[in-house]
Amino acid sequence: MKHSLKIAAMALALATASLMPAQAQDLGNRPIRMIVGVAAGGATDVTARMIAQKMTESLGINVIVENKPGAFFEPAYREVTTAPPDGHTMFMISAATVVTQPGRKDFPYDIRKLEAISLVSEGPFILTSRNALGFKTVQDLVDYAKKNPGKLSFGSGGGAGSSLSLSAELFRLRTGIQIINVPYKGAALALTDLLGGHIDAMFDALPVEVEQVKAGRVTGLAVTGAKRSPALPEVPTMTEAGVKDFVTNNYFGLLTTPGTPPAIVKKLSDAVAKAVKAPDIIAQFDKQGMSPVGNAPAEFSKMLAEDLERWTQVIKEAGIQPQ
């Protein structure tokens, strides 16, 4: 009898052990949280909600967007870094999230320590100017700035150290002009002042500016990507406009809690790759001037590290002291 019980106990232990890897790789049916570090309504939030819906459909698990706005994305970072490493907490980031790290002294989080899931979409920034200045090209703007040193004002949504502010600084470095970099709490406020004639130019995310350029409210001078955007094919790249070594992109991507098992990360990554192939998602990205990506975790991780290094170097070259 004792021998039979011992054999039964061993069999149960082996069965339990054999189930553990499968259970560790299984997301179960609990809802998945997709944390967004900004308020609802912006491009990051809109992208998150589109992808969350598609992931819900493909995974058969509710993916719920939660907005956790706060200074320098810290509330969002805190949510994802302190969550259990089980794939049930994701973090939708943008290029702005990455540049926060080198721009802040003693920033408490390292984005490279989070598990990369996938790059969702990417697209260029755009340089626009107010119509009253009469600029038709980037060279027109540069000539004006050189004739009027220190008078050309750039609005920077997100404030000093944001991706838009650093794009203006990079432009200053590459062209040798003097500018006044005016910080704004948000890009929408900067755009309002550009339309009102209170500032002269600004870098902005393409989804926001496409309709403004098409409607003739502002002048699109150049996009910052390696190639022209299908959303505004008539607007040249910075390279075509004569500005060398100036290729930057806005992007959105998903990360998850450090230590999440690779199998779960892959399952989430595969769901993103499927989501961005949906015709309605592609159509929406086209309208925004963004391109769907859906790459592998290792590829996205490498890209994040390279982008972090690039902006760290720009901050150093521009003489910006981390705050």
Image (cartoon, rainbow, N blue to C red):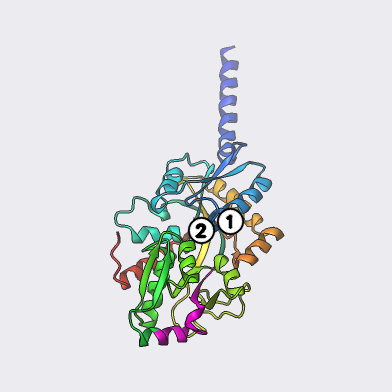
Residue tagged 1: 47
Q: Is 37 displayed left or right of 292 in the figure? A: left
Amino acid carrying label 1: it is Thr
Examine the structure image and report whether residue 127 is included in the region drawn in magenta: yes
Callout count: 2
Decide which of 85, 12 is in the foreground and name it: 85
The vertical placement of 156 against 26, above or below, is: below
Task: Read off the magenta span.
Answer: 123-144
Q: Residue at x 36, y 63 (%)?
A: 160
Q: Position of residue 133 (x, y in %)?
A: 47, 82
The vertical placement of 23 against 252, above or below, is: above
Q: Is 141 displayed left or right of 25 in the figure? A: left
- Image quadrant where residue 14 sits: top right
Among the two numbered marks 2 and 1 on one chain, the one whose residue lies closer to the N terminus:
1
Decide which of 247, 25 is in the foreground and name it: 247
Which circle, 2 or 1, is nearer the viewer? Answer: 1
Q: Residue at x 48, y 70 (%)?
A: 196
Residue 88, disc: none
Residue 298, disc: 2
